[in-house]
Every structure is written in structure tokens, then in C-alpha cells.
Image (cartoon, helix red, strand yellow):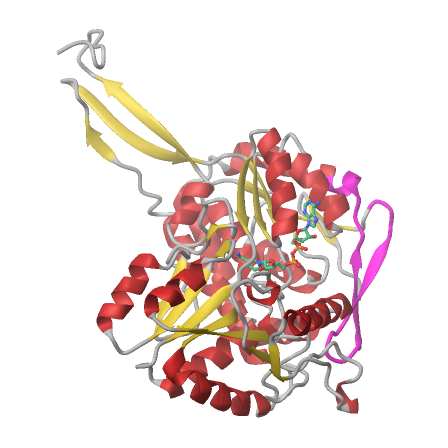
């Protein structure tokens, strides 16, 4: 099967007629072909989005919202089918793939409601017979660039608020996961999105992504991906004073105190560290443990890791799917060697599985390092695989300092039964997301999502915060006094 670009309401072949082949990372099974588009395709998409903006910005917000209700309904009806395709394409286990689609459904219904809200403010004026209010204005063409690890959720976090606020969209999904992007845009088409309002261009970051961030008719860029690419996007968009939201990497930690419920903590650790094979921006890759329970937790964790079943995400018995591709396996392997060279102790894992049934996939054994110190690279750098590093601390304060001593600031978690400790941690943990007595993953779409420090540039996705990125505030003053009144000058 061949996927196609969607430009100005038409499904179209890429200009040069070239395609890439996508294979299942768990089995090597051949899946579908995806366009290798060029700058020419991208330029056509931006032109269509620019033209469509003139009318889309004038469609009443509630009507734009109604379209998203339709989209949410269609996503809901096709949830299982979409999740199956996701698991085939990028490997996460079926239950998690369903969760990924569910985030899209939640976001559709939530943002659909914003079509009727999108509240501004009315406020008194400092002068008599004068009225003051604010409204949100759409901005223009939104360039949407997404990673492969949440192929449905992340595009919907960006596209739905962009649309409901009256912007038009050019969407460049990750090269590894085109199918869910294709299905999402098909659903938008089916729901009745007018021609040119949503455009989809498949292709590489260096060709299509680069052309998108540099295009002078693209007013804003919403990017999620690695720090390396994010920094480049920031440099290019900054140079052109283009609005850019950057959601980047993480090096998230779970802190476990001596007084924690260990069974609960173990469940949270396994889910956060090895769910999606560690390939979540919010995955737990550091386990900061108070010394009194360190040995007990290590032993029980090792046992639980040994019980995890690797395999295709479509197999009900599977706990941990494959990594996305061979480069990801190589990257994890490299970090295993770095950890060993730095003097960390490899408790379990650290290699690809020997099971011949898994030989065709990009699998890696869930891995636990102990005796890790904060200075080690495995405790500082994003590995993006099933590798967990255990760090011993004496106190809550030391744990919080350890948590905050990385360049990333996305998610953190604390297991304790002590409410005082919990609130001190909430005050002092320097991350955009904090969980108490839960793992580092599990964001809900009506709260702001994003990280502090090196995880981004201060914007937030989801919640009402997303509306701020995708709209411009306009302050309006109506003077009905019939005379010139000068603010700050007249009494
Ligand atoms: P990536 O940076 O390699 O790619 C992300 C996107 O950028 C892709 O669509 C890619 O094609 C595109 N791209 C590449 N070069 C480009 C260029 N020069 N110009 C414009 N676009 C370009 O990231 P990835 O490997 O797809 O995703 C994994 C990373 O994403 C991890 O670091 C992970 O932590 C991060 N991530 C962050 C969040 C978050 O919300 N903070 C969520 C999910 C993933």
C-alpha cells in the first residue's frame, strides 16, 4: 500500500514520485510505502494553507469546534483499528497504543469545547465611558512537526488547538510513523475539514522539516522531538522572529523514600521505566532511592524485571515491545558500554535477547544499573530505551538535588507516605510534571504538558495553555465618551 500527501484537499503523489518503505520493528514484516517529498511539495502545501487561512479564520469558533467533535467521534469508532496499525508500525504494546489513540479522542472533545469558550477578559477601564476587553486571534499557517513515539497523541495535541483557534496547518509527521498521520488526516477530511485547512506532507526532517521551519509564510512552528533538532529549530525560527514551541527530551526520575509503599512503587517503576520500551519523553530512567530500602528495592526490582515478556505488541502476553529501529538498539548498546566503563554495576539486561523468536525485531532486554552516581553520563543523558539507573541517597533533600541536577526538566515522581515530604517535594522539584505516589508517566490532556529548563522553551501543550500558543491576544478599547481621553494623562 502507498500513502499519499494531502495538499489543498487532494491526495497527491510526491513531486519526484519517490517512496520509502516501512517495516514492522517487532517482526521485520513489510508494511507500506510513504512519500519522500521535497521542498516543492511542501511549498504547495504552505501555499494552500495560506490561501485557506483567509476563510478559516472567519468560520465561527463553535463551528470549528463541531468539526472536532466529529473527528473525536470517528477516532473513537476506529480506536482498535488505529491502535493495531500503531503497534504494527512503531511497536508499542496494543494496550498502550489504545491509550495513545484515546489521548487523541480526549483532545478532540476537549478542544471542540474550546470552540465555544476561548474566553477573553472584560475589564474596567481607568477612564470613564470607556470599555476594555481582550479577544484571541488566530495567527496563520501553523507548521506541525512531530516525533514517532506518540504517533496519534502528539499530532492531535498540536493540530486540534491550532484548528479550533482558526489557524491552518501543514503537518510533517515523523518519518518512522506515517500511517497514523495518514489515518488522522483521512478522518479530518471525512469530518469535513475544508480544502487547504489541513495539509500533510511526508518526508525527511532535513528536506521537508527544514523547508517548513524556514518558510516565510509559516507563522508558527510547533515542534516535539530531540534536543538536538529542537535547538536547530530554535535557531532558525529565532532568527526570523517566528513563534516556536519546543517540547524536547527528558531524564526523568522516580524518588522512593524509606517510608514508601514498596509494592506500589515497584508497579510505578516498571510501568514508567519499561512501558513503551523506555521510549517516552516522560519515561523514568533514574531511580533515586533512600538508603534504608535500597537493597530491598533492588532485589525486588531485579526479580520483577526478570518476569517481563518481550515480543510483538499485538501478542497479549507481551509486556515490552521492540525499539523503533536498529539505530536505537545501537544507541542503547553504546550507553550500556558507557555505564560499564563509568563503573556502574550491571544488575540485569544490558544486551539484546538471545531468543531466536525475537531475532527479526529490534529488541533489547530491560536493563538495570546500580551503584550509579549523579555525575555518570547514564544518569545525565537521555538514552530513550529500557535502561534504568539506580542512585542511592540519604535524605529527601539529597534526592531532590539529584533530581534537579540534569539539564532536562520534564517529569519527576515521589513515593512516600509522609504528606510533609510530599509537599516539600512539590515545592522544590524543578520539573513541569510532578507525580506523588505514581510513576513519571500518565499526563491528562486538560492540564498543561511540558518541561522546564532543557526540555523546551517555556511553552506548554494541552490544557488552556495550548490556546495561548496557537493564538494572539488582542486588547480592545472602545471609548464612548465622545471626546479624546488620554490614558495616564487625563484624570
Ligand atoms: P527527532 O528530533 O529526531 O525528530 C522529530 C521530528 O523532527 C521528526 O518529524 C523529524 O523528521 C523532524 N526533523 C528532523 N530534522 C529536522 C530539521 N532539520 N528541521 C525540521 N524538522 C526536522 O526526534 P525523534 O527521534 O522523532 O523523537 C524522540 C525525541 O522526542 C526524544 O528526545 C523524546 O524525548 C522527544 N519527545 C519529547 C516529548 C515532549 O513532549 N517533551 C514527547 C515525545 C518525544
- Whether the magenta-drawn stretch holds residue 212 is answered as no
The quarter in which the N terminus is drawn is bottom right
From the top left corner, tell me how far across and down residue 375 is, in percent: 55, 62
Give the magenta part as a residue range.
15-42
As drawn, is 365 to the left or to the right of 244? right
**Residue at position x 58%, y 72% from top?**
278
Pick whichever, 409 or 142, lies toward us: 409
From where the camera sits, is residue 45 visible?
no
**Vertical relation: 52 (above or below) 300:** above
- Whether the magenta-drawn stretch holds residue 38 is answered as yes
The quarter in which the C terminus is drawn is top left
**Vertical relation: 481 (above or below) 216:** above
Residue at the top extreme?
483
As drawn, is 316 to the left or to the right of 137? right
From where the camera sits, is residue 144 visible?
yes
Pick whichever, 483 or 231, lies toward us: 231
Quarter of the image where ligand 1 sits = bottom right
Q: Quadrant of residue 314?
A: bottom right
**Residue at position x 67%, y 34% from top?**
215
From the top left corner, tell me how far across and down residue 244 is, in percent: 54, 40
**Vertical relation: 393 (above or below) 236:** below
Pick whichever, 68 or 262, lies toward us: 262
Amino acid at each position: 500500500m502507498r500513502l499519499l500527501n494531502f495538499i489543498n484537499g487532494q491526495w497527491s503523489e510526491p513531486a519526484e514520485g519517490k517512496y520509502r518503505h516501512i517495516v514492522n520493528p517487532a517482526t521485520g514484516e513489510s508494511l507500506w510505502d510513504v512519500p519522500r517529498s521535497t521542498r516543492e511539495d511542501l511549498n504547495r502545501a504552505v501555499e494552500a494553507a495560506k490561501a485557506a487561512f483567509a476563510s478559516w479564520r472567519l468560520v465561527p469558533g463553535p463551528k470549528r469546534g463541531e468539526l472536532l467533535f466529529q473527528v473525536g467521534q470517528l477516532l473513537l469508532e476506529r480506536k482498535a483499528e488505529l491502535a493495531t496499525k500503531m503497534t504494527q508500525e512503531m511497536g508499542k504494546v496494543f494496550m498502550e497504543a489504545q491509550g495513545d489513540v484515546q489521548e487523541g479522542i480526549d483532545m478532540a472533545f476537549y478542544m471542540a469545547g474550546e470552540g465555544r469558550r476561548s474566553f477573553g477578559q472584560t475589564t474596567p477601564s481607568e477612564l470613564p465611558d470607556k470599555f476594555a476587553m481582550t479577544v484571541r486571534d488566530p495567527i496563520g499557517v501553523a507548521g506541525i512537526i512531530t516525533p514517532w513515539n506518540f504517533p496519534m497523541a502528539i499530532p492531535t495535541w498540536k493540530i486540534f488547538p491550532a484548528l479550533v483557534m482558526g489557524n491552518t496547518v501543514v503537518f510533517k509527521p515523523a518519518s518512522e510513523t506515517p500511517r497514523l498521520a495518514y489515518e488522522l488526516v483521512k478522518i479530518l477530511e471525512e469530518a469535513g475539514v475544508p480544502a487547504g485547512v489541513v495539509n500533510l506532507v511526508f518526508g525527511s526532517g532535513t528536506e521537508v522539516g527544514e523547508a517548513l521551519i524556514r518558510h516565510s509564510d509559516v507563522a508558527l512552528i510547533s515542534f516535539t522531538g530531540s534536543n538536538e533538532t529542537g535547538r536547530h529549530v530554535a535557531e532558525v525560527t529565532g532568527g526570523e522572529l517566528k513563534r516556536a514551541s519546543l517540547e524536547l527530551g527528558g531524564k526523568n526520575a522516580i524518588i522512593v523514600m524509606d517510608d514508601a509503599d514498596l509494592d506500589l512503587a515497584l508497579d510505578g517503576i516498571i510501568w514508567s521505566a519499561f512501558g513503551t520500551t523506555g521510549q517516552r519523553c516522560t519515561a523514568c530512567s533514574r531511580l533515586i532511592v533512600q538508603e534504608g530500602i535500597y537493597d530491598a528495592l533492588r532485589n525486588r526490582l531485579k526479580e520483577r524485571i526478570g518476569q517481563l515478556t518481550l515480543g510483538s505488541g499485538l501478542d497479549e502476553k507481551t509486556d515490552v515491545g521492540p525499539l523503533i529501529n536498529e539505530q536505537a538498539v545501537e544507541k542503547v548498546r553504546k550507553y550500556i558500554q558507557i555505564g560499564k566503563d563509568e563503573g556502574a554495576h550491571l544488575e540485569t539486561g544490558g544486551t539484546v535477547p538471545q531468543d531466536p523468536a525475537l531475532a527479526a525485531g529490534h529488541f533489547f532486554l530491560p536493563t538495570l544499573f546500580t551503584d550509579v552516581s549523579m555525575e555518570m553520563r547514564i544518569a545525565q543523558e537521555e538514552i530513550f530505551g529500557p535502561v534504568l539507573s539506580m542512585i542511592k541517597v540519604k535524605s529527601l533533600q539529597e534526592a531532590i538535588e539529584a533530581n534537579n541536577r540534569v539539564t532536562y526538566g520534564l517529569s519527576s515522581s515521589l513515593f512516600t507516605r509522609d504528606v510533609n515530604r510530599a509537599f516539600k517535594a512539590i515545592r522544590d522539584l524543578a520539573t513541569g510534571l510532578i507525580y506523588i505516589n505514581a510513576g513519571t508517566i500518565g499526563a491528562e490532556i486538560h492540564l498543561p504538558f511540558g518541561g522546564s529548563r532543557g526540555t523546551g522553551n517555556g511553552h506548554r501543550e494541552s490544557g488552556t495553555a495550548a490556546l495561548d500558543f496557537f493564538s494572539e491576544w488582542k486588547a480592545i478599547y472602545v471609548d464612548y465618551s465622545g471626546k479624546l481621553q488620554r490614558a495616564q494623562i487625563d484624570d
